Image (cartoon, grey):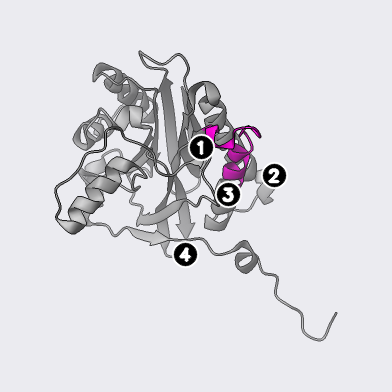
Amino acid sequence: MSLEEHAEWPAVRWGASTDIGPVRSENEDSWLAVPPVFAVADGMGGHLGGAQASSKAVITLREFLSPQRLGNRSVDLVDLSVAIDAAATAVASLASVDNPMSAPGTTLSGLMVLRTAEGSYWLSFNVGDSRAYVVGGGGIRQLTHDHSALQEARDLAATSGAPRVIPPANVVTKALGAGQVGSVKADYTIMPLEDGDRAVICTDGVHGVLSDSRIHEVVADGDGPQGAADRLVRASLEAGTRDNATAVVVYAGTKSRVTLTMNVMNRMIQPVRPASIETARRVPRREGGN
């Protein structure tokens, strides 16, 4: 639906596609591309306002990450964290005063291209069960970890050795809004970015019906980020998705072949957390003055 290029190294091109799907009466997905930040949001709540919740989340992110808001300085992890906190507050404000537990909610997942003195990184952020992947060096790797009952069952089985108990439905266990009590914080990870990487951010209407290998196959094809995003959504519909389907695809760097980069499976993924805004933006105290 859109294609843009961002000139700063690593050069970034992106495309995005969304479809209501064959069953739903409304598209509750939203997406965002404000380089160097890219995201998707999957609204929940149906008639309670799932579409409004996802839209509110990405609009708030866009506002807080705008050059006007940041004073034309580069976006960093603290800025991103502040924007996500603001999005959580904005979505929570949609709740009915009479019935706050019936509030609409939304997932929020994405990637930021983070430039540092040590090099460039993919910085992932996640609340809910939308996902961010990176394709590079002949492999594909999921950078986010689902907040869902299904993922919790998988994690428990992996750590305890107990038989996996599959929940009756893939319930999202963390979201913006949705009547959740307390401050909802995103998970963040970083992974080194290599020239030629391609990233995918998608809702469960895509990753719920397409295997990682199928996503890799589509994105590794060389028809550009918009073509890849369109084909991911089309493949999801052909695979029988019953949900809204949304994908954002990002090309980073100048290489035309993802196989020329270091395989993503050989790169280290590390969890990170933002410093407090008071620490990060502290103004040095002047000695000898008031």
Asked whether 182 falls inside the magenta stretch, the response is no
- In contact (CB < 8 Å): disc 4 and disc 1: no
Looking at the image, tell me whether mark 3 or mark 1 is earlier in sequence order. 3
Q: Circle 1 sits on which residue?
A: 178
Kind of residue at disc 2: Gln
Q: Circle 2 sits on which residue?
A: 68
State the extent of the magenta-drawn residues as a range.
85-104
Q: Residues within 10 Å of mark 2 (few under 14, many from 20)?
A: few
Q: Is residue 14 left or right of residue 149?
A: right
Nearer to us of marks 4 and 2 is 2
Q: Secondary structure at mark 2?
A: helix
Q: Secondary structure at mark 3?
A: helix
The residue drawn where x is 39% and y is 55% is 189
Residue 180 is situated, as x and y percent measured from the top left of the image, at 51, 44
Q: Circle 4 sits on which residue?
A: 117
Q: Secondary structure at mark 1?
A: loop
Whether residue 62 appears in this view of the structure is no
| Nearer-the-camera pick, 38 or 24 | 24
Q: CA distance from mark 3 to mark 2?
A: 19 Å
Nearer to us of marks 3 and 2 is 3
The residue drawn where x is 25% and y is 51% is 155
